[in-house]
Amino acid sequence: MPLSENPSAAFGTLAGDHAGIALGRAIVARLDELAGITDEPGVLTRLYLGPAHRRAVDLVSSWMTEAGMQVSLDGLGSLIGRYEGTTPKAPALVIGSHIDTVRNAGRFDGNLGVVTALEVVRSLHRRGHRYPLAIEVVAFGDEEGVRFASTLGGSRAMAGRFDAATLDERDSAGVSRREALASFGCDVATIPRSARSPADTLGYVEVHIEQGPVLEASGLAIGVVTAINGASRGTVALTGKASHAGTTPMDLRSDALAAAAEIILMVERRAREQPGLVATVGHIETPGGAVNTVPGKVRLTLDLRSPFDAQREAALGAITRDIRAIARARGIGCDIAMSYEAPAAPCDAGLSARLAASAGRCGVPYTSLPSGAGHDAMAFRGVLPFAMLFVRCRDGLSHHPDEFAAADDIDVAARVLADFLDHLAT
Ligand SMILES: [Zn+2]
């Protein structure tokens, strides 16, 4: 019997509400509608505080109102829908993600988490059900970092750590964040009021597509995130001696590119030795390189990520030592400059265990995995407990128009989130 013909669907119970993949289909329909809101006709591009972001805020705001939520827009353009608890001013659980996109984006990144939370609240509202706690659905607008240099302004403000200096950042057209916020109708003087504390907010939960291939490779619809990986990034400049490729014997060369090749393979080997660690040389340049020249200069990038800071720091130390040793053995100069360090943001063990227990009650197999990409959730590190639920996406593809998550998998995530709320509140 197809699930959609399940007789329990006739009852107005939680089971009936969630029979078939009704929630998944409703979420996909809303994602399709949202995907039509773009700054660039024909593709999905919705930049922070742009005209499409404005229209998306208006649409999601109308959905929140229909779902029984009180809607507000904060000083950084984060849209907040509050579904009150049985007592007014009860502490809230915040569930959210972002509705800004990269250029030429897919429909699911960010938007999925907002719409999934919204649909789960809508099903509560339909049944007239409230919890002792309030639920706030948040649509952040500044996650992708396409328009301005810094990112996560909305979630950082909610964590009480917004950097006011970023108000003066300018986009490529010379418009400052401060000016863009004013034309969006946001009052920057109210930004400090967005800050949450454990006294008013129980925690933050985010549903997001995985943006990687692990769940698909494991044949699983969902995963509970253990941590958002910390990252180290930098560049390595290698200086050998440019010389004639025809006249310079092999034993008299200082080939910077051959040294780089050895370094790239060493970085790969070091990362493979450590489960959970990923390390990448993503870009390499040979300034002045030519087919008949022994390369004298090379610049290459380094990117290391891990859910464990100690693991990442140890690996970076080992890689740095190996780079110097490879360069020394080849008579090559090397300069290593690290430009970016972000600590790992571990998910809250208690909230994550509750998500896992909900998956178990829903009869859904899952795995635990770290997030290799950054998310709004990491802004709450050390301020509020947070947890994330990943949804399988096809080919691990994201930031691309072919990004895809199946309605069945989305439905699983929505049912797990609904069960999580049911049990959090009791
Ligand atoms: Zn995202």
Image (tube, rainbow, N blue to C red):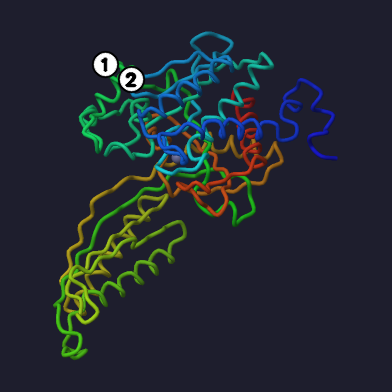
For disc 1, the marked residue is 189
Residue 188 sits above or below residue 8 on the image: above
Give the quarter of the image for residue 409. top right
Check disc 1: other Cα within 10 Å, few if <14, some if 14-19, many if 20+.
few
Q: Quadrant of ligand 1?
A: top left
Q: Amino acid at mark 2?
A: Gly
- From the viewer's side, name the closer residue of 44 and 164: 44
Across and down, in percent, residue 242 comes to 15, 78
Q: Which of the numbered marks, if any, corresponds to residue 332?
A: none
* Residue labelled 1 has its Cβ within 8 Å of some atom of ligand 1: no
Q: Does residue 290 appear to the left or right of 205 in the view shown?
A: left
Residue bearing mark 2: 75
Q: Rounded to the nearest whole Å, what is the CA distance between mark 1 and mark 2? A: 7 Å
Q: Position of residue 273 (x, y in %)?
A: 43, 66
| Residue at point 52%, 8% (across, down) | 88
- Is residue 317 or residue 34 the one in the foreground? 34
Tag 1 secondary structure:
helix
Image side of residue 359 versus residue 162, left or right: right
Q: Is residue 415 above or below residue 345?
A: above
| N-term mark: 1 or 2 | 2
Query: In the figure, is residue 363 to the left or right of 239?
Result: right
How many discs appear?
Answer: 2
**Quadrant holding the C terminus:** top right
Q: Quadrant of residue 144?
A: top left
Q: Position of residue 367 (x, y in %)?
A: 59, 48
Kind of residue indicated by mark 1: Ala
Q: Residues within 10 Å of mark 2 (few under 14, many from 20)?
A: many
**Which residue sits furthest top?**
88
Q: Nearer the viewer, residue 200 or 215?
A: 215
Question: Contact (CB < 8 A) between labels 1 and 2?
Answer: yes
